[in-house]
Image: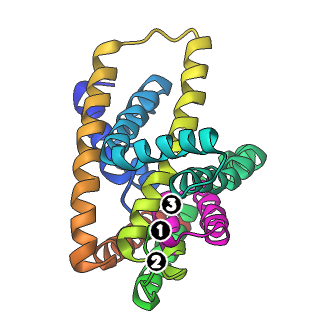
Amino acid sequence: MDWIQATSIALIQGLTEFLPISSSAHLLFPSLLLGWPDQGLTFDVAVHLGSLLAVVIYLRRDLISMVLGLWQWQQEKSLNPQATLALMLIVATLPAVFFGLVLKDWIEVHARALWVVAATTLGFGLLLGWADWRSRRQYDLAAMSWRHTLAIGLAQALALVPGTSRSGITMTAALMLGYTREAAARFSFLMSIPVILAASSLMSLELVISPVTISWAPMLLAFGVSFASAWACIVLFMQIISRLGMWPFVIYRIVLGVGLCWLLLPTLS
């Protein structure tokens, strides 16, 4: 992989990881349109760690508050709102972990076809638009309940299917439950931390036990590009949804889905 490929794919990963537009769909294009090779495990670890650092820094106040809340809970034996939110994030992560372990091999074989990505990109994009249009948008993050947490966590498990978009489906579920756009996005970003951390840890473990020689220069470049693009993406996204809602991303997903369907046409003839 040359420098241009490394920079481009890291940029795609960083820009699409937290937007409700599906990073998996976008990462298909370099190989489908340009014939670029798979980036490899080392590269995957680098871009995921870059995205993880970006969201951790952006949400640092929430994370520090939750850590202090957990510490206070242990000291005082009384559950507080910050500790409750931390526990809710754990609960919200469990469905994705469970179904990921159970269905991993099936998804790898049956769910990575282009027609699946096209269908999920279109279908869940339209669902996001419907949720944004119909949502009451009356709850903030402080109103998050255990029932809602589990519902959003189950929705997150659907993102195991490529093209669904982890951030897109969790924001859709939160909007359908009546949360504001900002609260839906913030909870989705918080939910991404344990998911990305778990995925990065597993990939890092595979990397440690594999005989692959690490090329540090492209790996550091990928990390830096992914971090910078993910950070900028999160900041701009929060500004956009407060002014325009989710519809710019819904329209984009429709266009992307149609484009993927167009790529499918030669295979149908």
Name the secondary structure under disc 3.
loop
Which of the two residues, 141 or 223, is positioned nearer the viewer here? 141
Marks 2 and 3 sit apart, C-alpha to C-alpha, by 24 Å
Residue 105: x and y in percent read 73, 43
Pick the quarter of the image with the N terminus: top left
Q: Is residue 164 left or right of residue 224?
A: right
Badge 1: few (under 14), some or many (20 or more) residues near its Cα, within 10 Å?
few
Marks 2 and 1 sit apart, C-alpha to C-alpha, by 10 Å
Q: Is residue 164 left or right of residue 53?
A: right
Residue 48 lies in what quarter of the image?
top left
| Residue marked by disc 2 | 179
The residue shown at (29%, 37%) is 227
In the picture, the disc for residue 142 is 1
Above or below, comparing residue 82 to residue 224 in the picture: below
Name the secondary structure under disc 2.
loop
| Residue marked by disc 3 | 163
